Amino acid sequence: MGCDGQVVGSDDDDPVIEEKIRMLEGTETDAFEVAYPDMTVTIHFTNGCTLLVIPDPEVANEATAEEPIPDWTLFSPDGIWLGVGPGPVWRHQRADEPLP
């Protein structure tokens, strides 16, 4: 199954996203890039697909200083959580620990 152009976007209905994202099942991450300062993420997979994660500034505007909403999060297989945003800030900790 090839990946030509945009296959799915966040504005698509959830069932469409769930169907299209299945083409990543069973593949491995080939490269992971974060662009600064906009904090977009590009993930390349071994099957030739690329996942582009673009922070939504409207969601960031809904956050408060006390409860910021990360632009994106990544959970690693060894239980580590990486939360980035809003903006060029990040938090890295064990996923089973409460947020400070």
Image (spheres, rainbow, N blue to C red):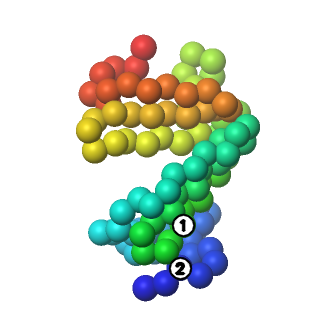
Where does the image place residue 32, in percent across and percent down from the top left? 51, 52
Residue tagged 2: 3
- What SS does tag 1 mark? strand
Q: Is residue 14 above or below residue 6?
A: above
| Residue at the (63%, 78%) spot, across then down | 5
Contact (Cβ within 8 Å) of mark 2 with mark 1? yes
Residue at 49% x, 33% y: name it: 83
Give residue 90's quadrant in the image.
Answer: top right
Q: Quick check: 34 left or right of 1?
A: right
Name the spot of residue 85 as percent of width and height, x first: 60, 32
Asked if residue 67 is positioned above or below residue 39 in the image, the reply reads above
Q: Does residue 26 appear in the picture of this structure?
A: yes
Q: Quadrant of the N terminus?
A: bottom left
Instruction: In this rendered view, identify the residue nearer to me: 81 or 35.
Output: 35
Q: Amino acid at mark 2?
A: Cys
Above or below: residue 1 compared with residue 22: below
How packed mark 2 is, by other alpha carbons closer than 10 Å (few <14, some 14-19, many 20 or more), is few
Give the x, y percent position of residue 61.
Answer: 70, 33
